[in-house]
Amino acid sequence: MMKKQWLWWSMMGLSMGTTWAQRNVKDIKKDFLNPKSNTVLVASHRAAHNQFPENSIPAIKEAIRLGVDILEIDVKVTSDGVPVIMHDGTVNRTTTGKGKLEEMTFAQLNQLFLVENGKATTEKIPTLEEALLLAKGHILVDLDLKTDKMDEVLAVIRKTKTEDIVIFFDSDYEILKYVDKKNKRYMMMPRAHSLSEADSAIALFEPEIVHIDFSFYTPEVVGTIKKHSSRVWINALGPVDAALRAGKTDEALGQLLKHGANVVQTDEPELLLKLLKERKIHL
């Protein structure tokens, strides 16, 4: 069994560092959709990018290797209709080029290389198709919608047959309504900014999960969301991740879990997974 596992990871091109038992994406999804589950799931922000360029193929592979539950990636669409993975409106910060991504063709983007710590790498900007095919069978995908060109995005999801693993995230409810109308089976994650907005999101979408932040992270908000069998997403990004890195684990976990959030997005997936497993709140 170990030999087969090693061969599989070798074919995927992944490194052999800290790796926990891998769960099939069907098991992750079953847990994700189970309102009675006590598991706190981990989402890796812009893939696992501590040692690799953000939103890159190696960063996606690393998230899978680590046993992360949900891969968070950002999608935009080129001027000629190709969905690609990129967070910013421009390519200036993360590539060797300059310009607004959605004003560039895919051929133009393909001439660029991703940058890591200010240095050019050999990595290209991934297409959404490449990312979803890598994720398929291994990990759920939180698709952070940085575009309103949803027909092109949905076409790729249908082509790759990954309708069952994608979670659509946006604070623009009109875009989420469009996606929801196309297929009621799509998993939705509306962003809420208050209790009243969380109520509206639940009424509109009956979502699998609601994204909140610390400004209104209260027992009342969490209780309202969980009452409707939805999970609660909170971000560790920024100060909480910094506390994790500094070894202030009780402080960090206390902030994240104090009112019952049960999906955490982090830039430190390896650290967070380790802590949650030690406390037996991650499988």
Image: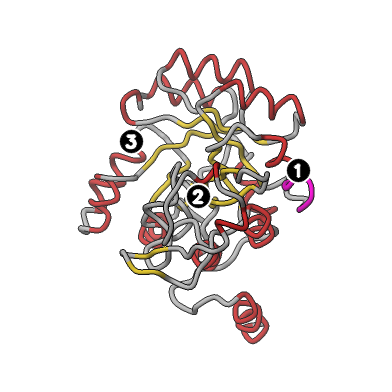
Residue that label 2 marks: 86
Look at the picture and state if 85 lies above or below 200. Answer: below
**220 shown above or below 151:** above
Magenta stretch bounds: 156-160
- Decide if residue 273 is in sight here: no
- Viewer-proximal residue among 27 and 159: 159
Q: CA distance from mark 2 to mark 3?
A: 33 Å
Residue at the spot 55% in from the left edge and 22% down from the top edge: 227
The N terminus sits in image quarter: bottom right
The answer to whether residue 274 is seen in the rendering is yes
What kind of secondary structure does the magenta stretch mostly adopt? helix
Residue 46 coordinates in the image, percent (x, y): 46, 52
Amino acid type at image mark 3: Lys
Closer to us: 176 or 97: 97
Question: As drawn, is 137 to the left or to the right of 111?
Answer: right
How far apart marks 1 and 2 lie (CA) works out to 18 Å
Colour pattern: secondary structure
Q: Position of residue 17 (x, y in %)?
A: 44, 77
Residue 271 disc label:
none
Q: Is residue 273 left or right of residue 111?
A: left
* Label disc, if present, on residue 258 of the rendered structure: 3
- Magenta run includes residue 245: no
Q: Which residue is mark 1?
A: 155
* Picture residue at 41% right of the left edge, 22% below the top: 193
The residue mark sitting in front, 2 or 3, is 2
Separation of marks 3 and 1 at Cα, in angstroms? 40 Å
Question: Taking 88 as reference, is 127 above or below it?
Answer: below
The reply to whether discs 1 and 2 touch (Cβ–Cβ < 8 Å) is no
The residue that appears at 43% across and 16% down in the rendered structure is: 195
Question: Earlier along the polypeptide chain: callout 2 or callout 3?
Answer: 2
Q: Please name which of the two marks, 3 or 1, marks the residue nearer to the observer.
A: 1
User: Three-letter amino acid code at disc 1?
Assistant: Ala
